[in-house]
Image: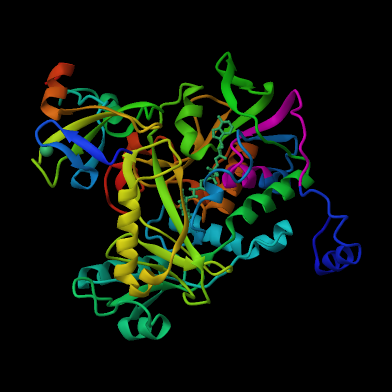
Amino acid sequence: MRYSAYSIFKQALSGNRLWTPAWREPEPKPHYDVIIVGGGGHGLSTAYYLAKEFGITNVAVVEKGYIGSGNVGRNTTIIRSNYLLEGNNPFYEFSLKLWEGIEKDFNYNAMVSQRGIINLFHSDGQRDEYARRGNGMRMHGVYAELLDREQVRRMMPYLNFDHARFPIMGGLYQKRGGTVRHDAVAWGYARGADQRGVDIIQHCEVTGIRRENGVVTGVETTKGFIGCNKLALAAAGNTTTVGRMADLELPIETHVLQAFVSEGLKPVIDHVITYGAGHFYISQSDKGGLVFGAEIDFYSSYAQRGNLQTVEHTMEEGVSLIPGLSRAKVLRSWGGVMDMSMDGSPIIDRTPVDNLYLNCGWCYGGFKATPASGFCFAHLIARNETHHVSRFMRLDRFERGYTIDEAGKGPQPNLH
Amino acid sequence: MASLITCPHCGARPKEEFSVRGAAMPARPSPMAKDEAWHAYVYIRDNPKGRYQEYWHHAAGCRRWLVVDRDNLTHDVFGVTDAADFVQARGIE
Ligand SMILES: Cc1cc2nc3c(=O)[nH]c(=O)nc-3n(C[C@H](O)[C@H](O)[C@H](O)COP(=O)(O)OP(=O)(O)OC[C@H]3O[C@@H](n4cnc5c(N)ncnc54)[C@H](O)[C@@H]3O)c2cc1C
Ligand SMILES: [Zn+2]
């Protein structure tokens, strides 16, 4: 069924009784051309673009929980392309361009909202650094503006401008940044892929990767063996666990990041704001809840829950930036486990096993990448060729000395 | 993660006093080791789910480097040793 104003009208007349499920729940077939492990944003978008752009429809997405139960349904929904480095900027800009047309493309309301993102700066040195990043963006053809303190004050009068330690001096503004309804992204891609013949197999955990003569022949799962010609991994925080099934040695550490949402409030925060004196970021959902988060918990963790120390720290940062936040009540908080890479940048590449493909290392910035990641990964799987915007995201870049260290933090994953 | 860490020098202390460096399992190769060994040490991580040894710094206490032996799924802490003792026990350097 195609969704449209007309379909809503028609369904309303029949009492909304005739809506059909957005995707099927098939049993696995014995064999597929491509199996994708992980029904998160990246796995689903990969399946969608494989079917839509590259004509490969005999595809299964195998997900151990339900789709959207991983990070794609746990993130703070921020999208942007305000990156400095050559290895990153054109990729994230490609992603932002795909976001701009995504709803028409997959015929699903993902509530893409280009409300603008502002990175605040609080010292001369930080202003220079942000100016450099803005210039880097503009040299890549991506518009950015450096706002001074008064321009920021007109847009966001509720911020703590006269903070004794971290006064707000201005911000780097990307107007086209914003937010997207994260679950709808998973659902939209799932529905689009399903309509083109992709099987989305939920509650099916991959427990082993079968190899014969050095190539993958299929996966062992809780629903039995499923054969494939090509296997693609998009398991985010569980990348190491799945990769080990094929003896991959990976530059990945798993960490937990928490997120928070307040009670619903009237519209107050119109943009996405990031605090340059900490790592706090905030926006307001269309329902009215303030959605925010800050740093990871810093210790390795496979548990989808965090520590109270980080909760307290996040609240302190928030109130330091927006004193009025102290009056809002937090409704919920949760954690997601992420694949932190050793340089803070992702990997979309082949592996030492010929027909095994790898998509990982998204750290806590992989939601914005969902469309481009799926597109480039599908390109790689279908044609065995790297898409040009993801050509720096190689698995061997660490040993070759070509890390993409956007934050300049070195090989310490919990700092990226 | 536990909210109290028992430092071998200072006793049970709130987690806020510590900062985390990262995995303590990779053993530092000799200076003359091959590039492959250094690449593995600097960049490759076993990243197991379960038992994990991690370097923690008691930044707001004795300022010693420690190794916290714990489970990264259940968050049980099995023990905390001084990093010097940990390295000696492993028999490197
Ligand atoms: C709290 C939080 C906030 C974030 N905020 C942002 C943000 O504002 N902006 C941004 O760009 N990014 C953000 N991120 C990062 C982003 O959410 C992730 O990088 C991205 O979602 C990861 O890709 P994914 O959607 O495919 O992952 P996931 O949704 O985690 O998908 C991986 C899937 O693989 C499945 N899987 C794992 N092992 C197996 C197995 N053996 N068999 C079958 N299936 C398996 C999992 O169940 C999971 O569903 C945030 C992350 C978190 C946790
Ligand atoms: Zn101590």
Measured as percent of width and height from the top left, residue A376 is found at 57, 46
Query: In the picture provided, is A364 more to the left or to the right than A123?
Result: right
A15 in relation to B80, above or below: below
In this view, the residue farthest toward the right is A14
* Magenta stretch encompasses residue A136: no
> If the image is split into quadrants, where does the N terminus of chain A sit?
bottom right
Q: Quadrant of residue B79?
A: top left
Q: How many marks?
A: 0
**Where A116 sits versus B81, above or below?**
below
User: Which color scheme is applied?
Assistant: rainbow
Q: Residue at x 30, y 77 (%)?
A: A160
Q: Is residue A322 left or right of residue A365?
A: left
Image coordinates of residue A177 in percent, x first then y, are: 50, 67
**Residue pictured at 22% horizontal, 24% vertical:** B27
Q: Is residue A413 visible?
A: no
Q: Nearer the viewer, residue A39 or A360?
A: A39
Classify residue A395 by image quadrant.
top left
Please identify the quarter of the rendering in which residue A162 is found.
bottom left
Q: Is residue A411 left or right of residue A48?
A: left
**Residue in the foreground of this view, choosing between A377 and A107:** A107
Q: Is A35 part of what is drawn in magenta?
A: yes
Residue A72 image point, x, y percent:
55, 49
Q: Who's the residue at 39% across and 45% down the image?
A: A306
Q: Is residue A251 left or right of residue A388?
A: left
Residue A396, image x, y percentages: 40, 35
Span colored in magenta: A23-47
Question: Above or below — where is A12 with respect to A28?
Answer: below
Above or below B54: residue A167 = below
Q: Residue at x 67, y 42 (%)?
A: A47
